[in-house]
Image (spheres, rainbow, N blue to C red):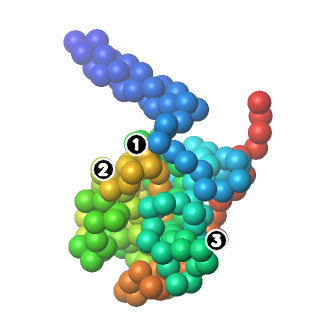
Amino acid sequence: MRLGRVAPLLLALALVATLTGSATAGDPRWVFYTTDKTHYTSPWFKGAHRIMIPFGCTTAPYYSPDPRCRNDRGFHHGLDVAMPCGTPLYAAVRLRAMPHDSLGSAYGDNPVLLRNRKRGFDLVIGHTRKVYVKPGDMVAKGTMFARANDRGAPDGCHLHFERRAVGGGLSTAVKPRALLALTPRRESR
Ligand SMILES: [Zn+2]
């Protein structure tokens, strides 16, 4: 009878080992539009991962030409961090989950919109599939609210982290890096 309980646990551990393993292998669809090869940790996600596409004008081909950018380059309104599919995403501060209907298809079919009225920002988390909060929920600091995925993204699983004004929409997106609080991983190998 005890074995019946242990077997699923072992299975879960094996799955975790598989996910961790794929972190080093990487996703063949990832293309890094930055020269920064540093792996960063953050209170917003598990593990240490590389920036794939920074905020602002970019040579990444997925964005239509933007008047703010030279040479027909597009504008990326968030910061993309490449990470294996299924990587847990955490709330680094207390947030309220909002309806995501206004976001549009570019973020996938199940993105997350989070709000912190006190600190004055909305947060768009793009390309998620598994989401563990629903609109109206208060999300306590440290809660795993979703897992990274590639929904609506041609370039592999990643976190799209986008900071906007409260209720402000896409045009109010600003550099999200300070909020993402990236810290270089200490190299131990
Ligand atoms: Zn993005």
Q: Amino acid at mark 2?
A: Lys
Pointer 2 residue: 130
Pointer 3 residue: 178
Q: Are marks 1 and 2 in contact (CB under 8 Å)?
A: yes
Q: Amino acid at mark 1?
A: Gly
Q: Secondary structure at mark 1?
A: loop
| Residue shown at 48% from the left, 60% from the top | 61
Which label number is shown at residue 171?
none
Q: Residues within 10 Å of mark 2 (few under 14, many from 20)?
A: some
| Residue shown at 77% from the left, 34% from the top | 188
Is residue 41 among the parts visible in the rendering? Answer: no
Is ligand 1 within 8 Å of the beta carbon of the residue shown at mark 3? no
Distance from label 3 to label 2 (Cα)? 26 Å
Percent of width and height locating residue 37: 70, 48
Which quadrant: the N terminus? Answer: top left
Distance from label 1 to label 2 (Cα)? 8 Å
Q: Is residue 166 left or right of residue 46?
A: left
Q: Earlier in the sequence, mark 1 or mark 2?
A: 1
Which quadrant: the C terminus? Answer: top right
Q: Is residue 144 left or right of residue 83?
A: left
Pointer 1 residue: 86
| Residue shown at 55% from the left, 71% from the top | 73
| Residue shown at 32% from the left, 56% from the top | 152
Q: Are marks 3 and 2 in contact (CB under 8 Å)?
A: no
Q: Vertical placement of 105 versus 128: above or below?
A: below
Q: Quadrant of residue 114?
A: bottom left
Q: Amino acid at mark 3?
A: Ala
